Image (tube, coloured by chain):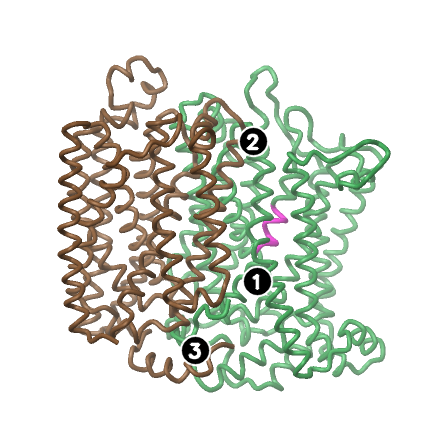
Amino acid sequence: MTSPALLYERVEKFQQKFLIAGAIGLGLCAAGGFINPTQFFRSYLLAFIFWTGLALGCTAIVMLHHLTGGAWGFGIRRLLEAASRTFPLLAVLFLPLLFGLPRLYAWAQPETVAADPILQYKHFFLNKPFFLMRAALYFALWNLLAYLLSKWSAEQDAAGNAAVSRRFEALSGPGLIIYGFSVTFASIDWVMSLEPHWFSTLYGMMFMVSQVLLAMAFAIVIAMLLSDAPPISEAISPGQFHDLGNLLLAFTMLWAYLSFSQYLLVWAGNLQSEIPWYISRASGGWAAVAIFLIVFHFAVPFFLLLSRTVKRQMRSLAFVAGALIVMSLVDLFWLVTPAFHPQGPRVHWMDIVAPLGVGGIWMAAFLSQLKNRPLVPLHDPDFDLASFAAARLEGASGHGH
Amino acid sequence: MDPVMPEPSAELGVSAPLIEPGHSYASVTDKISAIVLTRRTPRWWMLGFAAAFCLMMLLFFAVAYLFAVGVGIWGINIPVGWGFAIVNFVWWIGIGHAGTLISAILLLLRQQWRTSINRFAEAMTLFAVSCAGLFPVLHMGRPWLAYWLFPYPNTMGMWPQFRSPLVWDVFAVSTYATVSLLFWFVGLIPDLATLRDRSRNRVGKIMYGILAMGWRGSAVHWSRYETASLLLAGLATPLVVSVHTVVSFDFAVAIIPGWHTTIFPPYFVAGAIYSGFAMVMTLAIPIRAIYKLEDFITLRHLDNMAKIILATGLIVGYGYMMETFGAFYSADQYEKFMILNRMTGPYAPFYWALIACNIVMPQLLWFPAVRRSVVGLFVISLVVNVGMWLERFVIVVTSLHRDFLPSSWGMYYPTRWDWATYVGSIGLFLTLLLLFLRYLPMISIFEMRQLVSQTSGKTESRVSGNLDDV
């Protein structure tokens, strides 16, 4: 058991390390960008989408919990909120992409568009000013949601007025609708339009599920790392880890369900306008990545997470969750990179260093947000920490129904 | 009590009661079993049964004529080969989904509010699946050869085409019907034993006695019962998603614009749960008023169901939006035409009625006052039922009637036999439902007793309701 003071020190130390690692990583990428700017933007896009997706998933889970309640969410709510407060940073991290649009997107290259009637048609949607306006709107909405959720949480921690709970509920319904719309269109803008001829109506929903899965895995890992000191040690019992594990399992299944549905329908239709997307992703070298995803993003975590023992032990659950975080990045790599290398996977060193660099900066921002607020809700009317911890000790001997 | 309940002053939060105060084990058992055993069969039941029975006879008449003459009596032809039969099939099978969701997923999630509505929601599932199953068989043209759908060794050298989702449907729906029946029956056993013990006439004793399968309520029985129902819940959970996913594949595997789109699986599943909960609400509201069950099916139940209807309705709305956006973004002239034809073509009134019923009206459920108004909820649930039927009509008919070749366009008009079969299937559904209400306990007696013991001491709090032990 560590004392809260020691924990604070540890978080601060990690924050520094992440910041340094992130600066080095991004520095290396910047240097790489001078030598190979196209590759820089490709790798940087991957990194940006990954970490933005994590922050978005965290915001979505906070809102889901406000709407549905349940014991599972109180212990991780403040961690998720800290992640959601990184949207200002992510908006800044979006800016470098503005210089790389023609290198990334065929629809941003005038000469390509001039030779392609379909892209000329799509110009009403895929054009630079509208693209930027939409991106600005997404960040405005995400920042607003995160700001309100965190602001009211601070009010709740300070004063504990019950009216805040009702405000949370009133925001979370429309908030999730905003989340759904903005993530759908952001995924179309930023990722799907890399292959501007291709379209799938399921794509946005798949992104939402991937984000929520990633965020849940992230919350489990962070909660495990903080669980050897109060207050997290008191707020999250094995029972709650079990719940979180079940949710992780549910999201993993949902991810597989949507991925499979999209694949089956495109495969069965076998249309000229749709099938190329899967031809590059499910044949040649990319087929190996696809099979790797089926095995390690679905089959193995699925069977592990069915086990009660795995879910009730923090370490084993966090191990599975950590693996799923890595697999989420592989999944994103499989979604993004075949647009540039349809023949087979090619991993450039920047494909690894850019996610780590952006991740270092992001983690440092996350930890600085985390340490400045209480780690668990202090005055949520539905969550009384003292009685919760007492009940937990009582139930520790004879838990389970 | 009046069907329109006075507005409760308290917020319908988690602390609102799932069962009104003042009930004991005995009063719960008395109240529910009396409906079956001692109370006189109410006059409205007689009238309702007579009406439903007449409609069922209409179905049998229409089916008999269909068998004699053939599917030519329906409005289907080229290009619209899938008319009312498939619309009704999808509508009925969707309605069934609420029962499975309530009994399986909400059981696993330990949502106690499911207790008083699960029994008749499961019954509704079973009857809806029975109605649904009829239609593809009737649509075959030679229904007596329906067994050809199953892969069995035969001398004709025939084998089902396993790449066709229509074959997957056979397995999905028959599995669904089997698991739903088992789940429902296993859940009934303890209550059947209660009825056996309380029944005062010989026939009742024998019938309930046979069905109760020797249940004595010993600790061993209960422990086996718990295991069996958890296992069945686990088995039924994937079915909530898989059945309607396969139904969506029936459309989306084809390459017809309006059918072939990847959002179909999740959007069909959400639509199924949406229409299912609307139907549970449509049935629950009159039943609780007529049988005076407001103590058991409280406003909190209606409030929770309204929230699920709102949430799933929004997912359905997301599906419509993606379909429309996708058609324009895709740059495919057929896709664009399909959407424009839906919005402005000959069937446009159906499309806009569907948007009004499924998307616009349910937005009223955002208001707590609407969620607390029993009449308001009843009207909205009916509107959603209509809207979901229209949705399937629009998907089936507008996609087929004008596809790639203008020379092969055509219109679809249902005939009186189409209507007779559809209305008749509602008669079959209601007949079965009324028989169920009369002869079996419509609310699970033993689970309500459990609820009495849990709610008598303390009110449940959010913290205690976790997803443990799933």
The residue that disc 1 covers is: B104
Q: What is the secondary structure assignment of the residue under circle 3?
A: loop
Kindly identify which numbered label has been placed on residue A268. Answer: 2
Q: Between marks 1 and 2, how big is the CA–CA gap? A: 32 Å
Q: Residues within 10 Å of mark 1 (few under 14, many from 20)?
A: many
Disc 3 crowd, CA 10 A, few/some/many (<14, 14-19, 20+): some
Asked if the stretch drawn in magenta spans residue B93, the answer is yes
Dot 1 lies on which element? helix
Q: Which residue is at 13% across, 34% downward?
A: A31
Q: Which residues are magenta?
A: B91-97
Q: Which residue is rendered at x = 53% and y = 84% of the image? A: B453
Q: At numbered mark 2, what does the secondary structure look like: helix, strand or loop?
A: helix
Q: Colour of chain A?
A: brown
Which disc is residue A373 wearing? Answer: none
Q: Which numbered dot is residue B460?
A: 3
Give the colour of chain B.
green
Q: Quadrant of residue A331?
A: top left
**In this image, B28 relative to A360: left or right?**
right
- Give x and y (percent) for residue A208: 37, 47
Q: Amino acid at mark 2?
A: Ala
Residue type, label 1 = Ala
Q: Which amino acid, mark 3?
A: Glu
Q: Position of residue B111 (x, y in %)?
A: 49, 68
Q: CA distance from mark 1 to mark 3?
A: 21 Å
Q: Nearer the viewer, residue B363 or A81?
A: A81
Tell me which chain the residue with mark 3 is part of.
Answer: B
Q: Main secondary structure of the magenta part?
A: helix
Apparent side of residue B127 relative to residue B354 in the rendered image (left or right): right
